[in-house]
């Protein structure tokens, strides 16, 4: 039965039915999530088609960088150094806002979270360049105007620069943002809350009349001192982040406001100054800016990330009421989804594999909603009770254990995906540690082994019986033997998205380890094969 999902034009109005260029997956939206998904699908042997309604990449400032688990995933793909090289400024100190207070990791030798200051428009350009290197079919100025699906395909109506056309695909993924039409046409509910506030974030330069003091405070003529950190008034909140010895400052305001702004209309320096004046009751001179962005805070999550052959990722699937997490979550969605879609398309997927995309990433999205909603509660209160809550929370963050725990929650490194079966190793479901590895070929690392985006079986304890077991899946696996200091397990089975699918405990018996490895390989990578045996 055909499921009509959108206001598609009648067939007679469409100029032609055009092939999708042998693409088995159409991705709607060329933001970071869509571009990451396209690259991952290509690495997995699937040709995607990306349709983007905007004729050219947008210059409107949005996110200011990446942070958390996505940085380690980018290291796994060999992309992190490339992105780091594109940053024009130094990496910031590991100190992050959290609901009107700060998570300060500067005194920890191994902070649980890092950030990469890379404006979203530059990130999109770099990911677009990589898509071009991989020969991804990216069509800008092609707007999806309707979709419908049946059991075998999704039919997509597109309005391109040369007129309307129709194409079809095995799967369609909506990476088309917060106002996703793909989500709406698929009939996927998107419950949540919009908070009545507007946030403005900027990187500015100050004139010489404003002095940045040694402790980061600002000395403003005619006003006095504006403290570094957060200043709360009856009209809102002002955040100041500065580096002594420079006139470059990060500014952040929050005001209760119900105005609906067009995301494509950029914020101006005057708008920022007016906001500061309303919050602070004083004029702060500004000389110029390198980043100006405005956003509202929303807490929404799609009830499901899949409806038949249509899937959602990124902002189309979730919106979070805090900064610094959306790109992390969306790009991790893409990496989780790509290898599962590819396995399905290649005929290697075990039953239910594609459904684990929703199971795992909906869980991760719910964790992100948990801490970002907690930030709303910390941030929005103005009475004495709210001040007391922030003070107690700040005291807790002075201790290392709660600081690390909150840091892992924000970074997304605390995620443990549920694994099939019972009796799992503590690493099962977690992101694989980036071990330094020694082998006959020299020194390498787990991250380097993951560059091809393939599953990896890593033998760290010379377990030939486990290598023999894995031979039946050798057409799908990369198998490596190496040594490492203080191995966390005898053997690791790592999925393409970097999460541990299975691990053999140190000294685990051959019989037990062999049985559990075979079960894990079957659960994640399908039936064994005897291809090429003699």
Image (tube, rainbow, N blue to C red):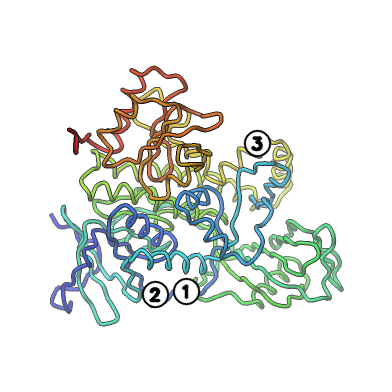
| Label disc, if present, on residue 58 of the rendered structure | 1
Q: Residues within 10 Å of mark 2 (few under 14, many from 20)?
A: some
Name the residue at 26% across, 41% down: 475
- Nearest the eye: 396 or 49: 49
Element at label 2:
loop
At which x and y percent is residue 146?
25, 68
User: Percent x, y for residue 161?
Assistant: 30, 81
Q: Which mark is residue 402?
A: 3
Q: Nearer the viewer, residue 300 or 453?
A: 453
Q: Is residue 475 above or below residue 36?
A: above
- Locate residue 384 relative to residue 444 in the image: left or right: right
- Quarter of the image where the N terminus is located: bottom left
Identify the secondary structure beneath mark 1.
loop
- Contact between marks 1 and 2 (CB within 8 A): the answer is yes
- Quarter containing the C terminus: top left
* 3D distance between C-alphas at marks 1 and 2: 8 Å
């Amino acid at each position: 039965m055909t499921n009509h999902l959108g206001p598609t034009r009648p067939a007679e109005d469409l100029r032609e039915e055009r092939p999708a260029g042998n693409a088995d997956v159409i991705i709607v939206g060329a933001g970071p999530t869509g571009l990451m998904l396209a690259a991952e699908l290509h690495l997995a042997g699937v040709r995607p088609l990306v349709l983007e309604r905007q004729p050219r990449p947008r210059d409107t400032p949005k996110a200011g960088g990446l942070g958390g688990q996505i940085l380690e995933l980018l290291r796994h793909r060999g992309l992190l150094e490339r992105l780091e090289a594109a940053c024009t400024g130094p990496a910031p100190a590991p100190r992050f806002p959290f609901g009107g207070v700060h998570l300060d990791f500067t005194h920890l030798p191994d902070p649980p979270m890092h950030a990469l200051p890379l404006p979203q428009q530059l990130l999109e350009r770099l990911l677009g360049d990589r898509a071009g290197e991989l020969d991804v079919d990216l069509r800008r100025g092609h707007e999806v105007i309707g979709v419908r699906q049946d059991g075998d395909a999704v039919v997509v109506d597109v309005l391109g620069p040369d007129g309307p056309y129709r194409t079809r695909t095995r799967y369609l993924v909506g990476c088309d943002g917060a106002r996703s039409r793909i989500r709406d046409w698929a009939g996927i509910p998107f419950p949540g809350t919009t908070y009545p506030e507007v946030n403005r974030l900027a990187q500015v330069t100050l004139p010489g009349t404003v002095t940045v003091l040694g402790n980061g405070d600002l000395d403003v003529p005619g006003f006095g001192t504006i403290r570094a950190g957060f200043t709360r008034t009856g009209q809102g909140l002002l955040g100041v982040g500065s580096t002594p010895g420079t006139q470059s400052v990060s500014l952040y305001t929050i005001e209760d406001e119900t105005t609906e702004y067009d995301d494509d209309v950029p914020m101006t320096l005057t708008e920022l100054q007016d906001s500061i004046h309303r919050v602070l009751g004083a004029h702060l001179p500004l000389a110029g800016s390198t980043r100006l962005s405005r956003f509202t805070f929303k807490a929404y999550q799609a009830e499901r990330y899949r409806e038949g052959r249509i899937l959602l990722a990124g902002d189309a699937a979730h919106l979070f009421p805090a900064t610094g997490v959306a790109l992390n979550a969306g790009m991790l969605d893409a990496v989780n989804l790509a290898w599962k879609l590819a396995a399905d398309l290649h005929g290697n997927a075990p039953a239910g594999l594609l459904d684990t995309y929703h199971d795992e990433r909906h869980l991760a999205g719910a964790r992100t909603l948990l801490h970002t909603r907690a930030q709303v509660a910390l941030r929005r209160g103005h009475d004495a009770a709210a001040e007391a809550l922030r003070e107690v929370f700040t005291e807790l963050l002075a201790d290392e254990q709660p600081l690390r725990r909150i840091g892992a929650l924000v970074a997304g490194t605390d995620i443990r995906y549920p694994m099939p079966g019972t009796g799992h190793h503590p690493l099962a479901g977690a992101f694989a540690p980036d071990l330094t590895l020694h082998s006959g070929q020299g020194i390498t690392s787990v991250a380097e082994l993951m560059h091809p985006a393939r599953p990896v079986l890593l033998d760290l304890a010379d377990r030939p019986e486990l290598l023999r077991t894995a031979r039946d899946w050798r057409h799908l696996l990369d198998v490596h033997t190496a040594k490492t200091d203080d191995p966390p397990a005898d053997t690791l089975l790592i999925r393409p998205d970097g999460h541990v699918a299975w691990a053999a405990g140190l000294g685990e018996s051959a019989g037990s380890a062999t049985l559990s490895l075979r079960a894990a390989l079957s659960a994640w990578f399908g039936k064994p094969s005897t291809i090429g045996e003699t």
